[in-house]
Image: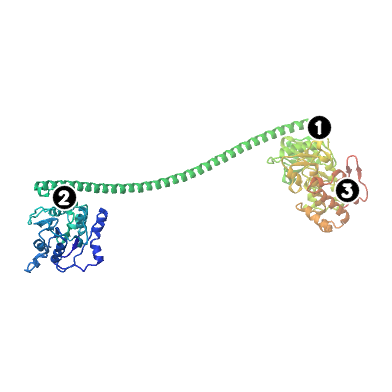
Amino acid sequence: MVTLLNAEGTLVFEPDEEDVANVFGNLRGLCQRKVVTVKEAVVDDNDVVKGLLDFANKNLVHSIVIGASTKNHLPSLKKFKAFNDTPTAMMKSAPDYCSVYVISKLKIVSARSAVRSMANQTSPIKQLPFQVSSQSEFEGGIRSILPRTGETNEASESRSFDSIVGTVKGTARERPRSAGSNQSLDNIDLPGGRGRQWASMDEREMVTLAPIDDVNSDLDLIDSYGTKPTNLTSQELEAEMKRLRRELKQTMDMYSSACKQAISAKNQAEQIRQWKLEGEKKAVEARLSQEAALAMAEREKARAKAALEAAEEAKRKAEQEVQRRREVEMKARKEAEERDRVLTALAQKDNRYRKYTMQEIEVATEKFSLSKKLGEGGYGPVFKGHLDHTAVAIKLLNPEASQGRKQFQQEVEVLSCIRHPNMVLLLGACPEHGCLVYEFMDNGSLEDRLFRRQNSKPLSWQKRFQIAADIATALLFLHQTKPEPIVHRDLKPSNILLDRNYVSKISDVGLARLVPPSVADNVTQYYMTSAAGTFCYIDPEYQQTGILTTQSDVYSLGIMLLQIITAKPPMGLAHHVKKAVENDQIEEILDPVVTDWPVEAALSFAKLALSCTELSKKDRPSLATVILPELNRLRDLGDTDNHVFTDTKNNCHTPRPPMAN
C-alpha cells in the first residue's frame, strides 16, 4: 500500500480519483507488465505523522520506508521549537513492532528496527483495503510511485531499490538494525530506467507500507539471504554488494555496448541510405548517359546512312556519266562509219549525180557571201549560186548540227535514187564538206508565199488547189517506192518549194525513213526510238508511241492543207477550222486575201483536211483512194482550159504554162 503526503504535514492537494490515477499510473503500468497485483490507499489527514501512525496501528504495518525531509526547508522550520520533521517523528512514534527506514539521495540515512515480534498482535487484516501477496507486489508498489526526474547517476540508482526492499524484508524477520546507521544504497539494484525516479527524494517524502500477512513466507528475496537472517554478516553483505556491483557493471557494459551497436547500426543505415542515394543518382546518370549515347548513335547512324546514300548517288551518277561517254563514243564511231559509208556510196554512184569540189562551191557562192544567202534551216544555210551556167541552190551542212551528217547521207541516198516532177532534183554534192546542190526554185517556199514575205503576190485559190494536189502526188510517190516505202516525217510549208510556174516540189528529205516492205500499204508502220519532225506537224500517235507509219505523213499533210486555205499558223488550227465548219462559218476562216473563194469547194477541201488530222491513224483517210482523188477533183475546178495531162499510171501530172494571177 502506498500513500503520498508532503513533508510539512499539509496535503499537497485535495486528491480526487483523477489525481490518484495520475499518481499511481506508473505503478499500475509496471505491475501490469510484471503481472503483479497491487492496491493503493490514500490517507486523508492534516497531520502526516498522526495519519501515518493511525494507519500503521490499524493495519499492523511492520515496515515503513519514508523519505528524509528536504534540507532546504529544515533551517527555516527548526526555529519553531515545536517542529518535528516527519521522518524524526515517525522514528520516535512508530509502534515497537514496526521497522522505520529513512532514505535520502538513494541512501539509508537512518533506521529504527522493531523491538518485538508481531506474533501476539491481533491482526485486523479484514480492515485492510488492499492485499500484497508477494515480493513482486511489494516491490511494484514501491517502484511505481517514484518521481521521474532523470537527474541522478543511472548506475547508483539501479543499486538502491533492492537494497531498500532487502532492508525492509530483513526487518520483517525481526533482524536487529542500528537506528543510527548511515547505510549505503549502492547495493540496491533497480530495474533499468527506474533509478531516475529517486532523483528528488530529498524534496518530497515517500512512504511505503506493507501488510503483515504472509509477507515473510512469500518474498523470494529472503531466500537469497538465507533462512536465518540473523546469521547474515557484514562480510556477506559486502560480498553481495560486490556481486551486485559486478552485475550492474556488466549490465551497464551491455547497455553501453547495445547503445554503441545501435549508434553503429544507425550510422550504417545512414551510410546505406547514402549509398542508395548515390546508387540511384549514378543509375540516373548512367541512364541519361545511355540515352545520350543512344541518341548520338542514332545521329551517327543517320549521318552514315546519308553518307552511304550520297556515295551511292555519286556512284550512280558516275556510272551514268561513264555510260553517257560510252554512248557518245559509240555515236561518234557510228557517225564516222556512216561518213565513210556515204563517201564510199558516193564514189560508187558518181553516175547518178555530179561531184563538185569545194573550190567550185566557193566560186558559185562567192565564198558563201551573205548576199547569196537564201535562208537557213535546221540542216544549215542555203545559198544561191551558178554551176555550169545554171542557177542552183546549195545547202551547206552545219558542223554543229547533231544530225547533220546523218541527214546529209539520208538525203543523198533518197534523192539520188528517185526522180519525180514533184520532188526537188539533186544536181550534185560535195561529200567532203557536206554540200548538196539542188535545182533553183524561183518562187521560194510555200510558207513564204502563204504569209507573203518580201511583199510577194498572194496565191489564188486555183494555185492553192493545184499545189495541194502536187504535194499529195509526190507524197504518194514516196509511199509507193520499191523495194521499201519512204516516210518523209517532216512535211511542212517551208519544205515545199515552188518553181517559176508554181509547180510544187517536196524537198528536205533528210529525215525520211525507209520502212520494211512487208509492213507497207495499209499497215505500214515502223517503230522509232524517238519522234522526229516539227512539233505542230508531228503525228500525235507517232509522238506518243514511237510507231512510224505512212499515216504519220497524212497527219502532217492535213495540217498543211488547212494552212493552204487559211494562211494561219499551225498551232490549234484544226480546232478553229472544225469549229467554223460546224457553225457554217467557213468563209470567216478562209484567207481573206482571196476574195473569190468557191465556198462549196473550200468547205469540201476543209473537211478533207480535217479528216487527215484525226488523232488516231485508223480514222484518217487513205492517201491513194480518198485524198489524192478529191484533191485532183478540186484542182480540176480551177483548170478551166483543161490543159492538164494526167498520167494515171504514175499518179503524176504535167503542169501547163503558168496561169494568170
**Residue matched to label 3:** 630
**Where is 589 relative to 353, above or below?**
below
273 with respect to 235 (left or right): right
Front-most of residues 142 and 131: 131
Location of residue 564 in the rendering, given as x and y in whole percent from the top left corner: 82, 51
**Residue matched to label 2:** 222
Q: Are marks 2 and 3 in contact (CB under 8 Å)?
A: no
- Number of residues whose C-alpha sits closer than 10 Å to that of mark 1, classed few (under 14), some (14–19) or many (20 or more): few
Front-most of residues 132 and 58: 58
Q: Earlier in the sequence, mark 2 or mark 3?
A: 2
Query: What secondary structure is marked by label 3?
Result: helix
Query: What secondary structure is marked by label 2?
Result: helix
**Where is 482 relative to 473, above or below?**
above
**Residue matched to label 1:** 351
Query: What secondary structure is marked by label 1?
Result: loop
Please tell me which residue is depicted at 47% across the width and 43% down the height of the picture.
297
Location of residue 550 in the rendering, given as x and y in whole percent from the top left corner: 80, 42
Type of residue at label 1? Asn
Disc number for residue 4: none
Mark 2 vs mark 3, foreground winner is 2
